[in-house]
């Protein structure tokens, strides 16, 4: 069974408080999402395989360590996953990026796919699926379903805020996928929003409401 990791570093929790606050404007919201994504990238990449590397320092021969094999790939779920992508790229600047366009139908809460594009060698990489919100779990499950249909096997999910219902749904559908979150909130409301959550992540990131 995949792990659920709550990234409880004080800097993450401090910045998450600004992200949640309804008084936070678009600029600060974007900045804090970006910074939390960078900090969470440390946690999600902990334990990735390293290989020894021989090199020469100005003083003499040395052995270093480098990430073994291909760099991880990032797969933001559009739109809101885009808000976390640059933050992760700060520590994984060579990452390839795939995109999965999904929106949640407001009436049925079911994800509707409208765009996909992956790196050609996505199946040979660790893929980090990125979305600030894990609510019912429908969007994350659909994204991971798609990746597995394309032959991807090594997948981790990174979200800012999750509802217990979303975590349970992803674990049920994809028990091999580790889930990294900054917080697990109380529940979903009748409209499928996370309570207390942060509202609509896409709208707050892009200023569309
Ligand atoms: C939001 C969010 C997730 C999804 C989560 O996206 O960014 O993708 O809802 O809900 P779920 O777990 O119930 O599927 P939304 O559909 O609002 O699209 P947007 O990012 O384009 O605004
Ligand atoms: N999507 C969001 O942006 N926020 C929620 O609380 C749930 C889904």
Image (spheres, rainbow, N blue to C red):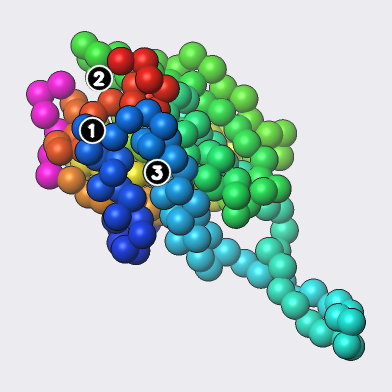
Q: Where does label 1 land, which residue?
A: 23
In the image, the residue with mark 1 has its CB under 8 Å from the nearest atom of ligand 2: no
Asked if the residue at tag 3 contacts the one at tag 1, i.e. Cβ–Cβ closer than 8 Å, the answer is no
* Image quadrant where residue 168 sits: top left
Nearer to us of marks 2 and 1 is 1
Asked if the residue at tag 2 contacts the one at tag 3, i.e. Cβ–Cβ closer than 8 Å, the answer is no
Q: Where does label 3 land, which residue?
A: 32
Question: In the rendering, at what x and y percent does residue 16 appear?
Answer: 30, 48
Nearer to us of marks 1 and 3 is 1
Question: In the rendering, at what x and y percent does residue 108 appear?
Answer: 23, 14
Q: Which residues are magenta?
A: 186-191
Q: Quadrant of the C terminus?
A: top left
Horizontal side of 102 relative to 89 (left or right) equals left
Classed neighbour count for the residue bearing mark 2: other residues with Cα under 10 Å, few (<14), some (14–19), many (≥20): some
Q: Where does label 2 land, which residue?
A: 109
Element at label 3: helix
Vertical relation: 148 (above or below) 58:
above
Horizontal side of 206 relative to 14 (left or right) equals right
Count of all numbered marks drawn on residues in the image: 3
Sooner in the amino-acid sequence: mark 1 or mark 3: 1
In the image, the residue with mark 2 has its CB under 8 Å from the nearest atom of ligand 1: yes
Q: Compare residues 149 and 195 and report the one nearer the observer.
A: 195
């Amino acid at each position: 069974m995949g792990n659920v990791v709550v990234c409880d570093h004080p800097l993450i929790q401090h910045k998450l408080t600004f992200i949640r606050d309804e008084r936070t404007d678009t600029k600060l919201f974007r900045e804090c999402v970006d910074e939390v994504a960078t900090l969470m990238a440390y946690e999600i990449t902990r334990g990735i395989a390293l290989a020894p590397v021989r090199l020469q320092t100005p003083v003499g021969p040395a052995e270093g360590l480098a990430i073994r094999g291909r760099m991880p790939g990032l797969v933001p779920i559009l739109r809101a996953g885009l808000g976390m992508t640059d933050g992760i790229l700060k520590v994984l600047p060579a990452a390839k990026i795939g995109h999965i366009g999904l929106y949640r139908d407001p009436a049925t809460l079911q994800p509707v796919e409208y765009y996909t594009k992956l790196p050609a060698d996505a199946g040979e990489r660790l893929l980090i699926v990125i979305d600030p919100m894990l609510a019912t779990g429908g969007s994350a499950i659909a994204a991971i379903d798609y990746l597995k249909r394309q032959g991807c096997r090594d997948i981790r999910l990174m979200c800012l805020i999750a509802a217990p219902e979303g975590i349970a749904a992803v674990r049920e559908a994809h028990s091999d996928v580790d889930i990294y979150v900054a917080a697990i909130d109380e529940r979903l409301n009748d409209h499928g929003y996370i309570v207390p959550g942060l509202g609509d992540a896409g709208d707050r990131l892009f200023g569309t409401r």
